[in-house]
Image (spheres, rainbow, N blue to C red):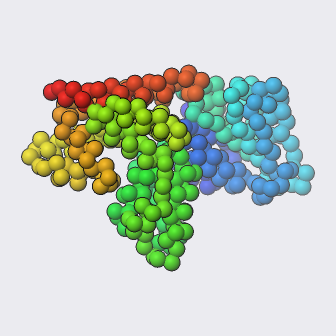
Amino acid sequence: MVALKAQDVDAFIARPDPARPIVLVFGPDAGLVRERAEKIVRASVDDLRDPFALARLEGDDLASEPSRLLEEAHQVPLFGGKRAVLVKAGSRNFAAAIEALLESPPTECRVVIEAGDLRRTAPLRTLCEKSKAAAAIACYVDNERDLGRLVDEEMRDAKLTIAPEARSSLVALIGGDRRASRSEIRKLALYAHGKGRVEIDDVLAVVADASALALDAVVDAAFAGRTGDTETQFGKALAAGTSSGTIMYAALRHVTQLHKARLTIDAGDSSEAALRSFIPPIHFRRQQMVQAALSAWTTPRLARAMEQLAEASLNIRQMRAPIDGLADPMAQRALLSIATAARRKER
């Protein structure tokens, strides 16, 4: 298997291995997929604007004409220099084109395939992961640590520092798509240019990620037992461009934090102390809803809710979204079940 490990991805992208001229970049984070694919292409050719150095192909076209990819990959550059082919996967299966290419891999050309979220059994993924001539790079949604590194990287490039509270709040407001997250951080850096240090007020004034705000609203409503609001806010989250998988990830992260907070209450601490255990800190506008959730749930029930959401999240990730068409209803049903359980307040 040649699926790159997470710790090896950055090094490979900076200096792609010549022994593996075919690279599949895939995953649920479309922004990160695009960013990494572009970086690999940029490291593989001298001029992205030169049509003789970089060929762009559509996977749907290769499904009808698979030999075209092999021809492009083995074409000799007219004026010499490095060459690359960028393939964007669509809805049609072009595994035959990849299979032929893997049997006769190019020596003077880099082929980068940009795809969406692929199941383990997807032909495109299995072909590339099994071949010694290819590398497969999975791009999953950034976790809290990834987002923190991204913030630090952009602040450093902008020659700015950021207050700890501002950093925590910023991390809570971004995520779901790497390109969108980076854009929000750069917008904040531009706003704070000349100040030297980014404060919490700067974050709240600039970073208005509708999808992140919608995520907070739907998970807060569910765990506070507000079934009607849960259904409404779930629809708003989808309308804001948030995937059902991202919503479930947010719900899992929230129930983990609630479980930790309930443990502090069980140990004798106050609900105010429990709220302070949240990382990043809960914004004051959300505190009433979170306190309602802490009152509605016991520690054992939160543990069961965690298992329920983890199972639903796994089922959603295994779907061929959006082909299956069941991910959104499954996520909505899981959250409404949580809201109903919160209203009952059983032991």
The image shows residue 267 at horizontal and vertical percentages of 10, 44
User: What residue is at 12 percent from the left and 41 percent from the top?
Assistant: 266
Number of numbered discs overlaid on the protein picture? 0
The image shows residue 268 at horizontal and vertical percentages of 8, 46
Q: Foreground residue, 21 or 151?
A: 151
Is residue 56 shown to the viewer in this render? yes
User: Quadrant location of residue 50?
Assistant: bottom right
The answer to whether 102 appears left or right of 280 in the picture is right
User: From what the image shows, is residue 233 above or below residue 338?
Assistant: below
Question: For the view shown, which residue lies furthest in the left direction?
Answer: 268
The answer to whether 162 appears left or right of 239 in the picture is left
Is residue 315 shown to the viewer in this render? no
User: What residue is at 25 percent from the left and 47 percent from the top?
Assistant: 288
User: What residue is at 37 percent from the left and 35 percent from the top?
Assistant: 229
The answer to whether 55 appears left or right of 254 in the picture is right
Image quarter of the N terminus: top right
Q: Foreground residue, 45 or 94?
A: 94
Image quarter of the C terminus: top left
The answer to whether 40 appears left or right of 155 in the picture is right
User: Quadrant location of residue 309?
Assistant: top left
The image shows residue 265 at horizontal and vertical percentages of 14, 44
User: From what the image shows, is residue 290 above or below residue 122?
Assistant: below
User: From what the image shows, is residue 145 above or below residue 329?
Assistant: below
User: What residue is at 80 percent from the left and 56 percent from the top?
Assistant: 49
Q: Foreground residue, 94 or 110?
A: 94
The image shows residue 174 at horizontal and vertical percentages of 46, 51
